[in-house]
Image (cartoon, rainbow, N blue to C red):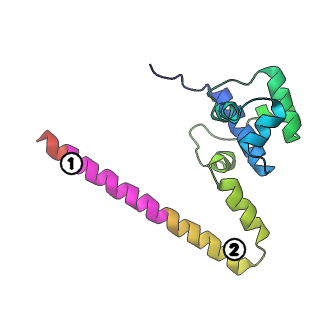
Amino acid sequence: MQGRKPEPLDAMVGAKIRVLRVSRGLSQSDLADQIGVTFQQVQKYEKGANRVGASRLSQIANVLGVSIGELFEQTRQRPGDSDTPFKLLVEPGAVRVLKAYVQTTDPRLRRAIVNLIEGIASRSAARKGTRRGEERRRSSLARL
């Protein structure tokens, strides 16, 4: 049996809950305790796997210090644009990296941090491309 794919609105609300939770330094367990659910339920809300009911959404917004409407506000983006700031912040660890970067005030150190992360990312992307190329060659050979 295949699980249902989250509806886009459920996924967006869940992603906003996650970004706001992380930005406020709350763990999934912390949020769960404050709204009376398990941390697994918070995980499901954040992934969009489970819809958040109106009263629960109100509780979450209250804990996060935002209005319910802010959880529904659409970010301005073009269809298919996966590099919007909001989508980037949803990535695990992104808010932590950004907070650490902001705490660093030395411009040279900030440049070094950016160069380090970009270098790691480009090497990772190059390795993925190499693996995909190898897989394509193998599948082409297998067809022969």
Q: How many marks?
A: 2
Q: Which mark is residue 110?
A: 2
Q: Residue 69 colored magenta?
A: no
The amino acid beneath tag 2 is: Arg
The amino acid beneath tag 1 is: Arg
- N-term mark: 2 or 1: 2
- Residue behind mark 1: 138
Asked if one can make out residue 86 in the rendered structure from this viewpoint, the answer is yes
What secondary structure is the stretch in magenta mostly built from? helix
Q: Secondary structure at mark 1?
A: helix
Q: Is 64 drawn above or below residue 3 in the view shown?
A: below
Q: Quadrant of residue 109?
A: bottom right
Q: Could you tell me if the residues under marks 2 and 1 are in contact, i.e. CB atoms within 8 Å? A: no
Q: Quadrant of the N terminus?
A: top left
**In the depicted view, which residue is nearer to us: 136 or 34?**
34
Rendered location of residue 55, percent (x, y): 84, 22
- Residue range in magenta is 122-139
Rendered location of residue 140, percent (x, y): 19, 45
Q: Is residue 86 left or right of residue 138?
A: right
Q: Which mark is residue 19?
A: none
Q: Residue 134 colored magenta?
A: yes
